[in-house]
Amino acid sequence: MELLKERILREGKVLSGDIVKVDGFLNHLVDVELMKELAREFRRRFSDERITKIVTVEASGIALGAICAQEFGVPMLFAKKAKSDNIEGGLLQSEIFSYTYKKKVTLIMSSQWISDADRVLIVDDFLANGEALRGLTEIVRAAGAEIAGIGIAIEKGFQGGGDKLRAVGYNVQSLAIIDGIEDGKVRFREDGAH
Amino acid sequence: MELLKERILREGKVLSGDIVKVDGFLNHLVDVELMKELAREFRRRFSDERITKIVTVEASGIALGAICAQEFGVPMLFAKKAKSDNIEGGLLQSEIFSYTYKKKVTLIMSSQWISDADRVLIVDDFLANGEALRGLTEIVRAAGAEIAGIGIAIEKGFQGGGDKLRAVGYNVQSLAIIDGIEDGKVRFREDGAH
């Protein structure tokens, strides 16, 4: 999606360690008008999927998730990151490795709010190694719900998480895929080349 | 606001320890249509304030924050909860006590995205003892920005955080104020009685 790619080129900052910082419009200061455009694009790409629920994970996925839910006219449900080992009953859960915090984190979701009647669109602002998405897909499947698609704002293609999800059959639609960073500049994958 | 109060009465669950669970529409499964109505009400109550930025705190404030930002036509900025003691430079911060996690948590925000040119509306889904709000007001003031108001979905009035903020001069507008829980039922404060 050209609008998002231009924004990344204009305002994103490439840091050491292949980090692309987009905290001026995506995941700290949030440009909700841009979010609306991303949500419209997901709506276009998943128009035939009869989505009943948007699922995401705290924290930065929630802004995009909420605005996608508006666009699709359905509720949004977000997985929480367990802060303690005491996890109450009635919860779906999946253990993932967080590269940000360099430790295991348990994603949790109440089984009360998702069922086999749901057709879910999973959304997130970022997809890199795909650990968070793996956890979300596990939880949604454990609830018996159908994963109708996965919508991502920015995918770091060179970290492989997205292609791993595509390889097992998920319809992963990323609006900008960064395939490499060279001399401090991002290089995008061609549209449709995944 | 009657719409929200009715929803709390109909779908909220009173648990032991004065906890009111509203995770079926506010802070786990999120009814974004309801959020839109809350945002419209804030817009009405703060219409003269020339708001330039919505500020909230992760995680559950983000959904309401994003939809308020849309309604006001401004960006949303959310404070993060520091996950480690290694906090990089250029960050505004405030230490609060989290009653949920029973420990100190540091709220952080990049000083790059807020300045003395901003007139901020702080929003959050819940206000109880007011620790998170105290932290947010500290950070926003440290940035030199003006706090034009505080908009809360549900205030637990009997925990005193809201009235403490009002006492020091903030315009705190809560759309439902729970003043007590008796025999497992919530009792609301009369509108305009704060």
Image (cartoon, coloured by chain):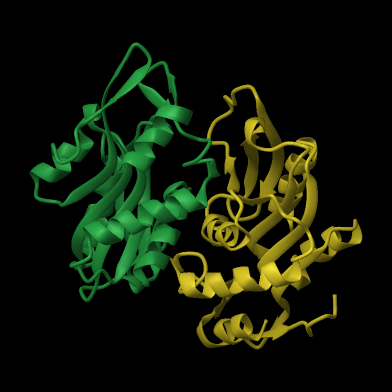
Chain colours: A yellow, B green
Q: In which quarter of the image is residue B179?
A: top left
Residue occupying image coordinates x 35% and y 73%: B112
Q: Is residue B86 visible?
A: no
User: Residue B121: x and y, percent?
Assistant: 27, 60
Pick the quarter of the image with the N terminus of chain A: bottom right
Q: Residue furthest top?
A: B183
Left or right of residue B77, residue B159 in this image: left
> As drawn, is B23 to the left or to the right of A72?
left
- Quarter holding residue B20: top left
A185 versus A103 height, above or below: below
Instruction: Please report the residue visible at 16 percent of the width from the left and 52 percent of the height from the top.
Output: B171
- Visible in this render: residue A65? yes
Q: Quadrant of residue B67?
A: bottom left
Q: Residue A84: percent from the left, percent from the top?
A: 54, 31
Q: Residue A130: x, y in percent?
A: 74, 57
Where residue B174 sits in the image (x, y, percent)? 26, 44
Nearer to the camera, B48 or A66: B48
Residue at screen point 79% across, 51% down: A147
For residue B10, above or below residue B16: below
Residue sitting nearer the eye, A184 or A117: A117
Q: How many marks?
A: 0
Quadrant including the C terminus of chain A: bottom right
What residue do we see at 23% from left, 31% from top? Answer: B157
B4 relative to A19 in the view: left or right: left
Up the image or down, A69 lies above or below A7; here it is: above
Does residue A73 appear to the left or right of B41 in the view shown?
Answer: right
